[in-house]
Image (cartoon, rainbow, N blue to C red):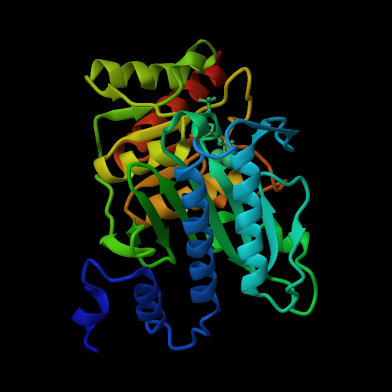
Amino acid sequence: MNQHDKLALPVGTTLDRFIMRKQEDFPYATGELSQLLRDIALAAKIVNREINRSGLIDIAGAYGNRNVQGEDQQKLDVIANIRFIRALRNGGEVCTVISEEDEEVIQTGNVQGKYIVAIDPLDGSSNIDVNVSIGTIFSIYRRVSPTGTEGTMADCLQTGTNQVAAGYVIYGSSTMMVYTTGNGVNGFTYEPSLGEFFLSHPQIITPKTGTVYSVNEGSSSSFSPGVAAFVEQCKQDGFSARYIGSLVADFHRNLLKGGIYIYPPTSKSPDGKLRLMYECNPLAFIVEQAGGKSSNGQMRTMEIRPQDMHARCPLFIGSKELVEQAETFLAQERQTQQVS
Ligand SMILES: O=P(O)(O)OC[C@H]1O[C@](O)(COP(=O)(O)O)[C@@H](O)[C@@H]1O
Ligand SMILES: [Mg+2]
Ligand SMILES: [Mg+2]
């Protein structure tokens, strides 16, 4: 197979075939990561079916519990959590799971498993029952502790630069899975009648800049001067404001069209709202692989050392030039604070 065949897998290739072909790029690959990606795709198909018919069956609304974030769990949050954890446990490749919906780590019992998965089973919970795009976000690490034991905290609290793969599923007008293993970003669209994901967006490259900014301006009264100045600059430059309120959906649009998504520190969320391990790091890996950028306004997201599985951090992510522009405003703000 020559170089051209290896790179240019035709649009319409199934996800399974793509994973197998890409595995051939790594002579020492043992197939475990490939199997893990297939396990995630399988769970995504099941969750997709539940989401599509959520209005017909009694899975709409709140579940009646609060998760470790203090958020009311939606029934679909719980269903998606169960489905993904079951698929990761049954697949056998994963020893430990970090989930947004579980306070403690989940030891799957697969002590021979080489991988750790951090997952946001259902992203965009506030949009679940109103038929707006929602998603699943996942991040995969190789364990650092020896196999034969349960995953440790050292396995779970690795920096984002150690990710071996990351991705998301968007349940929208179509359902897509977008992921990277560090060799570019590829998107697959789900064909429900065939039950298969097909390559539809090969080698995604995000535009260097754009004219869309995504931030919840409802919190603008507590934006720092630097954030407020950047948002004002976007308005003066005639940018369009787009905010779906589902991180995956806002990120996906900006990834394809160019733009910036910001979740800054606010009075309600002094460290921002989004979680480093299963929201910020996986999307940072993808955007960097697509030529974009991600930071907390100052530091590269993937270099932030997680202090806690559910640690939050501010997020500035998207087109490289826009993230750099926002960082410049924040640097000026820090300088002003230093001299005052
Ligand atoms: O309503 P806010 O404060 O703008 O927050 C919206 C953000 O919160 C989230 O819903 C958090 O994710 P979860 O739904 O997984 O908890 C993001 O998807 C979204 O971007
Ligand atoms: Mg989320
Ligand atoms: Mg969630």
Q: Nearer the viewer, residue 64 or 208?
A: 64
Q: Position of residue 305 (x, y in %)?
A: 64, 50
Quarter of the figure with the N terminus? bottom left
Q: Residue at image x 60%, y 57%?
A: 84
Q: Quadrant of ligand 2?
A: top right
Left or right of 203 on screen, residue 219: right
Question: In the rendered image, is residue 133 in sight?
Answer: yes
Q: Where 83 falls versus 274 (above or below)?
A: below
Q: Position of residue 152 (x, y in %)?
A: 77, 64
Q: Position of residue 203 (x, y in %)?
A: 27, 61
Q: Nearer the viewer, residue 161 or 287?
A: 287
Q: Nearer the viewer, residue 282 or 34?
A: 34
Quarter of the figure with the C terminus? top right
Q: Position of residue 337 (x, y in %)?
A: 55, 18
Left or right of 319 on screen, residue 163: right
Q: Indicate the quadrant where residue 319 lies.
A: top left
Q: Indicate the quadrant where residue 4 lies.
A: bottom left
Q: Residue at image x 50%, y 68%?
A: 37
Question: In the rendered image, is residue 165 in sight?
Answer: no
Q: Where 92 falls versus 274 (above or below)?
A: below
Q: Residue at image x 54%, y 62%?
A: 163
Q: Nearer the viewer, residue 229 or 80?
A: 80
Q: Where 262 falls versus 308 (above or below)?
A: above
